[in-house]
Image: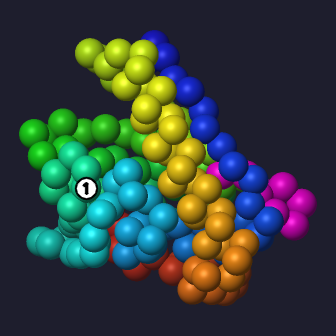
């Protein structure tokens, strides 16, 4: 078993809207600085971004109505990292939970640093959605909004 930590934030926005916004890879630079520093683009059928780790490929789970935002990040060296992520409905709002895995060779401080970075990203996501700065995605378009299946 791989040790892990769950990092979460509550968002005062409907789960459907949060999912529809977060599952769109082109929105990642607005809220996920730990993953995408600049424009996310389709290259040879894959979502590709410049990240703090270098050029990475990102593949989200297939569109679903359960709020599953799991995604695999393929690092520049070819290593694939699964990042479990969920949008959990909670009344009129939701909770977004990201699981940070303790990877082989990772020290405790690096794990803590990753958790802080994930929390900062989730807080940006929350702020965008609560302040209405995120482009509104209609709830009736959930989960069809994402057009391309992962590679």
Name which residue lies at 51% across and 38% down.
116
For numbered disc 1, what is the local secondary structure?
strand
Name which residue lies at 55% across and 73% down.
21
Q: Is residue 22 left or right of residue 107?
A: right
Q: Is residue 119 left or right of residue 28?
A: right
Q: Which residues are magenta?
A: 89-96
Where residue 92 sits in the image (x, y, percent)?
87, 67
Quarter that holds the C terminus = bottom left
Name which residue lies at 12% across and 46% down.
76
Asked if 40 appears above or below 50 in the picture, the reply is below
Asked if 143 appears above or below 52 in the picture, the reply is below
Task: Identify the residue position indicated by label 1 in the image.
Answer: 51
Q: Dot 1: few (<14), some (14–19), or many (≥20) neighbours within 10 Å?
A: many
Asked if 24 appears above or below 89 in the picture, the reply is below
Where residue 120 sits in the image (x, y, percent)?
54, 50
Asked if 124 appears above or below 100 in the picture, the reply is below
Q: Quadrant of residue 43 in the image?
A: bottom left
Q: How is the image coloured?
A: rainbow
On the question of residue 135 being in view, the answer is yes
Residue 115 within the magenta-colored segment of the rendering = no
Of the pair 50 and 75, the residue shown nearer to us: 50
Q: Is residue 111 left or right of residue 75?
A: right
Q: Main secondary structure of the magenta part?
A: strand
Residue 95 within the magenta-colored segment of the rendering = yes
On the question of residue 68 being in view, the answer is no
Q: Quadrant of residue 106 in the image?
A: top left
Of the pair 66 and 58, the residue shown nearer to us: 58
Where residue 6 sits in the image (x, y, percent)?
60, 33
Where residue 45 sits in the image (x, y, percent)?
19, 71
Name which residue lies at 58% across and 80% down.
134
Count of numbered circles in the view: 1
């Amino acid at each position: 078993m791989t040790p892990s930590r769950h990092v979460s934030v509550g968002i005062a926005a409907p789960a459907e809207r949060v999912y529809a916004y977060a599952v769109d890879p082109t929105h990642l630079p607005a809220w996920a600085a730990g993953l995408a520093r600049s424009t996310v683009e389709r290259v040879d059928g894959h979502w590709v971004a410049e990240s703090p780790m270098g050029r990475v490929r990102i593949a989200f789970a297939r569109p679903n109505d359960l709020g599953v935002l799991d995604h695999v990040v393929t690092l520049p060296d070819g290593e694939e990292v699964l990042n479990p992520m969920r949008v959990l409905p909670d009344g009129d709002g939701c909770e977004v939970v990201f699981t940070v895995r303790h990877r082989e060779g990772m020290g405790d401080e690096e794990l803590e640093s990753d958790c802080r970075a994930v929390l900062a990203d989730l807080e940006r996501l929350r702020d965008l959605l609560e302040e209405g700065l995120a482009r509104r995605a209609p709830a009736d378009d959930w989960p069809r909004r994402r057009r391309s299946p992962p590679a």
